[in-house]
Amino acid sequence: MKAVEAFVIHLGRATQRRPQVEKLLTQLHLPAGIIDAVDGNKLTREEIAAVFRRNLHRPGYPFEVRPTEIGCFLSHRKAWQTILDRKLDAGLIVEDDVTVDGALYPRLLAFALANLGGNDVIRFPYRDYTDKGRVVAREDGLTLAEPRIIGLGMQMQLVSKGAAGALLEATEIFDRPVDTTIQMPGVKGVRVLVARPTAIRQIGHLLGGTVVQKTRKSAGEVLSREIRRALYRSAVRFNALKKR
């Protein structure tokens, strides 16, 4: 029996999400607690400079990384560190804008736990069309696959102890948001898998919206951003397929 606990990342000032957090703690089918999220808006320039540096990796990330995104990254690092500190075999890390399918989720979690390797991250994506790849395990309509291109979003992941240690070591300094970092190939000693079918939904729009602040952009800025996004995604796809 693996020693596994669940951790819900929650920003204390997002009080409208607290009822959903309390509900999640009872639904995850694991001993569960809260990880107090790092509030990026309260980070000093010195604190940001200690962990963030632009253009460390290729392809270069084409957008400005907001303090709230840095806080989100540090919150996930805090969860990875908690897995090691508590000497767990793995941790289920969940963001607080998630709801689970009460019938499917327990089966999918048990399947993922039964097939979790010592250096694995198993993603539970909320979109059906991402993370396509080679199936490595199958049982009663459930699958684990190794995606050709890892999807975005960090709503729920099962992170093994080995993967937590490797991710912490690889991201002492980072240059982009946490999901785009996980998406990049080449974190030594970490295998990323995806569990299907989709057993979670993102419900941030029902909980007051995102806590990662966004600013209104002009039409020209929107167009420029979409072009840069397309070029970046193409470069990520090329690098991922090249390393297969």
Image (cartoon, rainbow, N blue to C red):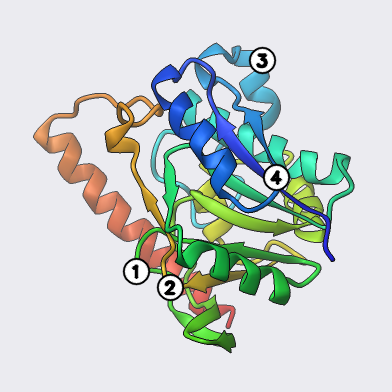
Q: CA distance from mark 2 to mark 3?
A: 43 Å
Q: CA distance from mark 4 to mark 2?
A: 30 Å
The residue drawn where x is 59% and y is 27% is 37
- Figure check: 239 above or below 13: below
Determine crowd level at label 2: few under 14, some 14-19, many 20+ residues with C-alpha closer than 10 A: some
Q: CA distance from mark 1 to mark 2?
A: 8 Å
Amino acid type of disc 1? Asp
Q: CA distance from mark 3 to mark 4?
A: 17 Å
The numbered mark, 1 or 2, whose residue comes first in the sequence reads 1
- Eye-nearest disc, 2 or 3: 2
Amino acid type of disc 4? Thr
Secondary element at image label 1: loop
| Residue with the mark numbered 1 | 128
Amino acid type of disc 3? Glu
User: Can residue 223 be seen in this snapshot?
Assistant: yes
Secondary element at image label 3: helix
| Residue with the mark numbered 3 | 46
Amino acid type of disc 2? Pro
Whether pointer 4 and pointer 2 mark residues with C-beta atoms closer than 8 Å, the reply is no
Position of residue 45 measured from the top left corner of the image (x, y, whole percent): 60, 14
The residue drawn where x is 84% and y is 66% is 1
